[in-house]
Structure formats: C-alpha cells, structure tokens
C-alpha cells in the first residue's frame, strides 16, 4: 500500500493527486490511497476540493492504514506539530527527500508520502493519465459561458495576479511585481501577437488600476465572479487559453500546465528561499 497525504489549497492538492496517479500507474499491484484527514481543523482555502471537481477514483486511507505506515495525523494541528517533533518512520517519504534526483525505484519500499510534490518530474511520465483524471465539469454558468465564447473567438492569453496573502509573505512577496507583468504583457503582445487577454486575480481592483495601461487597444476581460467552491472555474478557463502569464502560484501553474498554450511566461524563481522549487517550471516555459 502507498498513501499520499493531501493538504493545502486546490493547486497543491492537484500536485499531490498527480503524484498519486503516477504511483498508481507505476505500482499497479499495490493499493494507492489518499489521506485527507488533515483537513479537519485546516483553516485555509476551501478545504478538500478534489472530490467536488474531479471524479477521484483513489480511496481514502483508514485510521488503521495510517497507524500502520505513518503517524495517526487525523487533524491539521496534529500534523503541524507531529511533523516537527516525531521522527520519520521507515515507511515514510517526503518530497524534500528528492531535491534533484527522483526515480520510482527509490520509493518501492516506501508506503506513506508527505509534502507537496511540486515538480513535473514526479508525474510528467504519466502526463496523459493526469490530464485524463483532471477533467473539469462542463461549464454551465452564463458568465463563464461568455468567457468561453470570448476564448473561442481568437487566440487568448490569460494573466494571473496573486496578491492578498502574498503581499507580505516573506517567501513569496516581490517576485511577481508590477514590472514582471509589464514585461510579460509586452512579450505576449510584441513577440507573440496576443491582443485578447483574460485577467484573474484575488485583487481585480488593483489589476484594473495598474495593468490596463499596458493593454491599450487590446480586448480585455476581468474575471471576478468565481468564488469559494466555484473558484476552480477560473483555473478551468485558464486551461482553455493559448498563452499564459502566470504568478508564482500553484493555481495558475495548473491552469497553464493543463492547457495547450504555445507560450507560458513564468517568473525566474518560485520563492525567495534559495534553491526552493528550482525545477517546478517545465523546461519549455519561458522565465522572465
């Protein structure tokens, strides 16, 4: 048996789920399960979302499974404290155990996997299976259908701006600043000829004030109505675009990775921590 711990917002859940799908393909004779118990007491985002969006066919681990292979982390606070003070059991593996090199042979004897697994190398081999498993529900909302029609009329690029919690976060602040978006928009317009843009953000007011001056004579839509359990629609619309200017955010990372975009612009680094997630961006994405 192999169990993958699921925790974080939607984008992080998708990295973990993609890794689980990859393990299922690599170890067909083993039972693969998810541990979602850490969402009890989890204060951030929208809780466990995968089941509400995708048809997840990987079962949940039982308490007996957890006791056998890891520590009984059945509450977010237990996980928060326990991972700092309890030693790793022989059966446990973390994504940080594989900072550069990874192959499936190294984890044959491991049974419990914790961490975010934020790198294509953990699942790129099984890309088709991941894409098949992450099919969004059909769009039915009128506002989103209008955006879909906007996308289908001509080549469209999306821009994602994450502010809010990122503004003062020491690990993430300052990476995707205004100059990053000015440069990215200039490249999408000048080099690739995009004239249609969708803008997604948790601070649309800031975007309207600061980005619009770089989008003169362009057709621009600000998407600002998909909230709460419906926020995945933003990612779904991103995935339908032909170009992307992403933030250092797992949300727009997946919007770009699931798309057929022929150009994806991304920041030169994911965080301000030296060496952190150095291989999170696919090789064909353009760092600016």
Image (cartoon, rainbow, N blue to C red):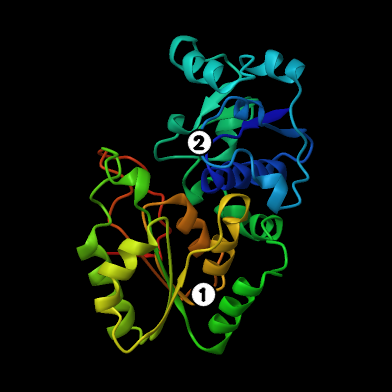
Quarter residue 226 falls in: bottom right
Displayed quadrant of residue 165: top left
Between 190 and 214, the residue placed more toward the observer is 214
Residue 191 visible here: no
**Location of residue 203 in the rendering, given as x and y in whole percent from the top left corner:** 37, 57
Crowdedness near tag 1: few (<14), some (14–19) or many (≥20) residues, C-alpha within 10 Å: many
| Residue tagged 2 | 44
Q: Is residue 125 visible?
A: yes
- Which circle's residue, 2 or 1, is located before the other in the chain? 2
From the image, which quarter does the N terminus lie in?
A: top right
Please report the residue visible at 56 percent of the width from the left and 47 percent of the height from the top.
10
Residue of label 1 = 241
> Is residue 70 found left or right of 1 in the rendered image?
left
Q: Position of residue 47 (x, y in %)?
A: 60, 38
Instruction: Pinpoint residue 150: horizontal percent, then vertical percent.
Output: 54, 83
Q: In this view, does 156 lie above or below 257?
A: below
């Amino acid at each position: 048996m192999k169990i993958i711990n699921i925790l974080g917002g939607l984008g992080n859940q998708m990295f973990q789920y993609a890794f689980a799908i990859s393990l299922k393909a690599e170890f067909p004779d083993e039972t693969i399960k998810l541990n979602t118990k850490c969402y009890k007491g989890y204060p951030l985002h929208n809780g466990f979302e995968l089941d509400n969006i995708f048809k997840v066919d990987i079962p949940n681990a039982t308490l007996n499974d957890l006791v056998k292979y890891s520590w009984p982390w059945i509450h977010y606070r237990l996980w928060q404290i326990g991972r700092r003070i309890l030693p790793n059991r022989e059966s446990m593996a973390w994504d940080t155990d594989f900072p550069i090199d990874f192959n499936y042979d190294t984890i044959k004897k491991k049974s419990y996997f914790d961490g975010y697994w934020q790198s294509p190398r953990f699942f790129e081999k099984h890309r088709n299976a991941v894409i098949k498993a992450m099919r969004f529900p059909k769009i039915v909302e009128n506002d989103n259908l209008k955006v879909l029609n906007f996308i289908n009329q001509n080549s469209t690029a999306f821009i994602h701006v994450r502010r809010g919690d990122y503004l003062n976060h020491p690990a993430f602040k300052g990476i995707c600043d205004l100059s990053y978006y000015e440069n990215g928009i200039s490249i999408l317009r000048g080099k690739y000829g995009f004239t249609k843009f969708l803008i997604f953000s948790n601070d649309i007011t800031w975007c309207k004030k600061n980005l619009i001056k770089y989008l003169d004579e362009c057709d621009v839509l600000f998407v600002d109505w998909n909230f709460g359990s419906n926020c995945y629609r933003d990612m779904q619309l991103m995935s339908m675009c032909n170009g992307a200017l992403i933030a250092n955010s797992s949300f727009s990372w997946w919007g770009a990775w699931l798309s057929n975009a022929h150009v994806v612009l991304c920041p030169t680094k994911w965080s301000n921590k030296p060496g952190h997630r150095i291989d999170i961006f696919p090789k064909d994405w353009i760092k600016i």
